[in-house]
Amino acid sequence: MNYFDHAASSTIYPEVLDVLTQTMKDDFANPSAQHILGQNLQEIIEIFREDFLKAIGANKNDSFIFTSSATESNNTVIRGLSLIAGDVVLYSKADHPSVTVPVEFLAEQFNVTLKEIILDTNATIDIEKFSSFLNENVKLVVLTHVNNQSGVVSDIEALAKIVKEKTKAHVHVDAVQSFTKINFKLSSDIDSMSFTSHKIGGPKGIAGLFLKHNHKVQPLLLGGSHENGMRSSTLSYPLIAGFHKAMKITMENSTQSFSKASQLSEMIMAKLSQMISTIQFPFKSTSPFIVSFVLPGISSDIILRHLETKEVYIASSSACSSKIPGFNPSLFAMNIPEKFHKNFLRISLGSLTTEKEVEALIREFLDVWDNLKHMRGR
Amino acid sequence: MNYFDHAASSTIYPEVLDVLTQTMKDDFANPSAQHILGQNLQEIIEIFREDFLKAIGANKNDSFIFTSSATESNNTVIRGLSLIAGDVVLYSKADHPSVTVPVEFLAEQFNVTLKEIILDTNATIDIEKFSSFLNENVKLVVLTHVNNQSGVVSDIEALAKIVKEKTKAHVHVDAVQSFTKINFKLSSDIDSMSFTSHKIGGPKGIAGLFLKHNHKVQPLLLGGSHENGMRSSTLSYPLIAGFHKAMKITMENSTQSFSKASQLSEMIMAKLSQMISTIQFPFKSTSPFIVSFVLPGISSDIILRHLETKEVYIASSSACSSKIPGFNPSLFAMNIPEKFHKNFLRISLGSLTTEKEVEALIREFLDVWDNLKHMRGR
């Protein structure tokens, strides 16, 4: 199998699988239990929490909350700020639905005003226009570090700085596609950040939310006051331990994985450009783990089906946008003309992706492209 | 080890562990992905969903939503009904915090009126008083099938019937402690129900929410429209498969496990009563999986610490209430005098608990009781 959909969900590290198997078996107690079995697990969770804070460069008095998904992390912040009519939210329609849908809910439900971050032709943020929207009414700015479809990397430190110079808005960053992959320095201008485990070789069902010490976010899940009152629910020690292990592994190999992915993604772009004259790479400043392109003339779904028969797996658009037929609002916000939305493809790499796998991908891709010659229109 | 805290979190079935290990390794794709790896997983999830609907006696057009915890399931319903000022919610302070805290939030935030379900001296619901609170302003009634601290089983079918005779209220049932353990018939009077995996030998981090086909619940997690729009987030196929396996095993052995637990819990009550004259069993109509009692004269925490040294684990109060010092509002609602809140103990059995383990528990418990003679007040 040649799996190139790591941005949707990555394969799990063997070491993480070992941690999960062992902890699911042995560490079954409820970490909130009063007996020593529970207390011991809660203590280790606190050590893991500190490790996560350290990994992102946060302080000990900041919070790292374990949630079930990045969707939950994003919803917790966006819905938890209790914004009211007249408040302005700055966001991008190019972002993941777990950001755009709750933001648009605020407008519908509470008459919050939405301002859209404008992207330039390469799907990067137009700083001048971004800056022009900032005023004292802006209460929340939602940014994405690495866009899940385009792979575009935003300079979140610089953007957060501009926000704080002109407003007192809460700055939230979705860092799902960049966490442990793309280097960044957590500045004091960033108030919250979302992360997830299953994009970095960990299990699904566990994720993280960084909250700066002075945040004003109200919890979404109320109950037994777990996670310092910020997220009630029995803590899943095994999933947290698996997430922690995946974070440790990816952090340790981060520089090396980045170089490797850069080399492999350049190889993909070079070879495909060389052989397919009509291919378009519309984005710049992208993560090396995501190679997205437009292939005019043939539906991306047909390419997907043909690649599947060769056990090669890539994506035609975000797994989380797959329910939108035809028109893709994220791609539209990225200035991809509507007629090309059906021709969009994404190849995404994992930290363990090898040159051999990439060579096989290119070979099979070009083979499919060649075989579909008769079907290609314009 | 003699583990008797299954009501807080159960040990995991070996067969479930096998499912988890295999699926975490092999079934890593995102079930929302457009390629066949994702589509295949989504198809199996739909089969699992039907199995859950069948298991609880629901119809095919009803919904079974996979959530991350029973806390999330309860919050989804309680917060998702969009109740407004003037609406009345009927609930019990004896219930789990994941029910009481979101209900009390509705009162604070939206001026919803709360009416408390009154319990009689055995902590069972006083039907006459319950019925007297019902009128057209009641929009939500929250019931618990088996109370997590007392183990008291409520006749949810009869109660839901009374509600529907007098109101159009939504009837929500927390069935976390009864699911697959206590027999019940899902009547059409019940609108929603919460379940969780980690109390029935499955993994933590996955849970369920039954919603009747004509429900009016708004989703809590917004984003990629997973779960028919009712719960956005990447579905964790391995956790769902593990939960499904645990449900299958417990359902198949349900009658046998109930008989066994009945025999064992009666044995515990008989032996402890026989040897400890001051022991009080304040509850009636209880689940055989939960044996709760008051032991005047010595703090339950001291007993816990001594039992721990013998690798025997029981609970002094719900794991989810452990953050409330001294006074326990649930026990108070159950008519347990405040002076006894520190003397409350809970022994909870799993479906695999053996007679030998129970004998060891009784022996060690009586030994600790005997050794603490010098410390006992009264």
Image (tube, coloured by chain):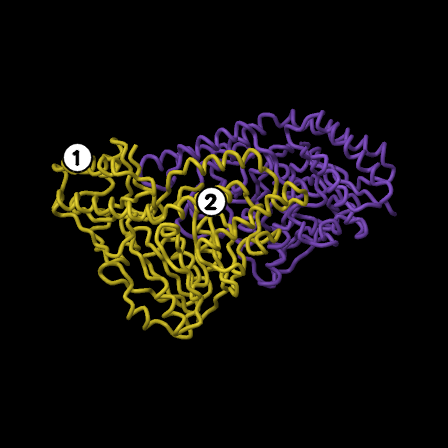
Chain colours: A purple, B yellow
Q: Are marks 1 and 2 in contact (CB under 8 Å)?
A: no
Taking depth in this image into account, of B67 and A116 the one nearest to the observer is B67
Residue at position x 81%, y 34% from top?
A366
x, y percentage for residue A179?
60, 36
Residue at position x 54%, y 49% from top?
B47
Callout 2: chain: B
Taking depth in this image into account, of A117 and B45 the one nearest to the observer is B45
The residue beneath circle 1 is B367
Viewer-side label of 1, 2: 2
Q: Specify whether B152 is left or right of A95.
A: left
| Label 1 secondary element | helix
Residue at position x 55%, y 31% from top?
A246
x, y percentage for residue B200?
39, 45
x, y percentage for residue B60?
53, 59
Give the mark, 1 or 2, whose residue is nearer the N terminus.
Answer: 2
Answer above or below: position of B21 versus A216: above
Q: Can residue B107 be seen at all in this image of the molecule?
A: no
**Which mark is on residue B243?**
2
Q: Specify whether B221 is left or right of A235.
A: right
Q: Residues within 10 Å of mark 2 (few under 14, many from 20)?
A: many
Q: Specify whether B343 is left or right of B318.
A: left
Q: Which quadrant of the rendered structure holds the N terminus of chain A?
A: top right
Answer above or below: position of B36 versus A274: below
Q: Specify whether A42 is left or right of A66.
A: left
Q: Residues within 10 Å of mark 1 (few under 14, many from 20)?
A: few
Tag 2: residue type?
Phe
How far, Cα to Cα, is label 1 from label 2? Answer: 38 Å
Callout 1: chain: B
Tag 1: residue type?
Asp
